[in-house]
Structures are given as C-alpha cells and as structure tokens.
Image (cartoon, grey):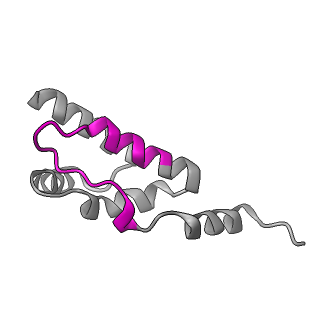
Amino acid sequence: MKDLSHQENIQVLMKKAPQLKEWSTFTGEGEYDHMSFIETIDILQEYYAIPDELITAKLHSLFEKCAKRWYYGIIQTNGKNTWSWWKNEIITKLANDA
C-alpha cells in the first residue's frame, strides 16, 4: 500500500469532514453561546485538518442575521484575516455587547 503524502492525507480528511450545512451557525443574538460556536469550528479544523483559509472563506455562510451584517462590516474594514483573528473579534464583540 502506498504511503500518502501530507497533502493527500489532508485531502482524505477533508472528504470525511462534515458538509458545510452540518456546521454550527452563528447569529450573535440573544443568549447564544459564541464559545460553543468557536469550539465547534476549532474541533472541525483540528480533526479534519481543515485549512484556515477554508474556514475563513466559509464564514459568510456560517454567520446569520445580525452576525452576518457585522461580518460584512468587519471584512470591508479589515479584509481577509485568519480564523484566530476572527475568533478574537467574535469574543471581543460579544464581551462589549454583554
């Protein structure tokens, strides 16, 4: 059996990853647990080797309602950023809104 390269291993893991419609979404409204959303994305990233670029490219689909409006405002001001950067922005936003 042929050994898979690192890139091939990542591709295999990505094929096993849940489809986007199965990922948690984030509204930013009410008593929503933003840390649960962040932890879910972190777990998906770790277990399925999902690249940072893919996660950040999918945020527009994971954010809903007021979170989506907030996201578009942030992206217009700050442009493309890492998942780590977005996590900090979510935490900061909700800490300030609480």
Answer whether residue 42 is magenta in the image. Answer: yes
Left/right of residue 22 with respect to residue 62 in the rendered view = right
Work out whether residue 17 or residue 69 is closer to the camera in this orientation and state it: 17
Percent of width and height locating residue 33: 25, 37
Q: Quadrant of the C terminus?
A: top left
Q: Quadrant of residue 79?
A: bottom left
Residue at x 62% of width, y 69% of height: 11
Percent of width and height locating residue 94: 17, 33
Relative height, residue 60 to residue 83 (above, below): below
Does residue 24 appear anywhere in the picture?
Answer: yes
Residue at x 10% of width, y 39% of height: 30
Does residue 89 appear anywhere in the picture?
Answer: no
Which residue is situated farthest in the right direction here? 1
Left/right of residue 8 with respect to residue 55 in the rendered view = right
Range of residues picked out in magenta:
20-43
Residue at x 11% of width, y 57% of height: 65
Answer whether residue 38 is magenta in the image. Answer: yes
Percent of width and height locating residue 17: 52, 63
Residue at x 47% of width, y 64% of height: 18
Percent of width and height locating residue 1: 90, 72
Relative height, residue 44 to residue 87 (above, below): below
Count of all numbered marks drawn on residues in the image = 0
Q: Quadrant of residue 37?
A: top left
Q: Quadrant of residue 91?
A: top left
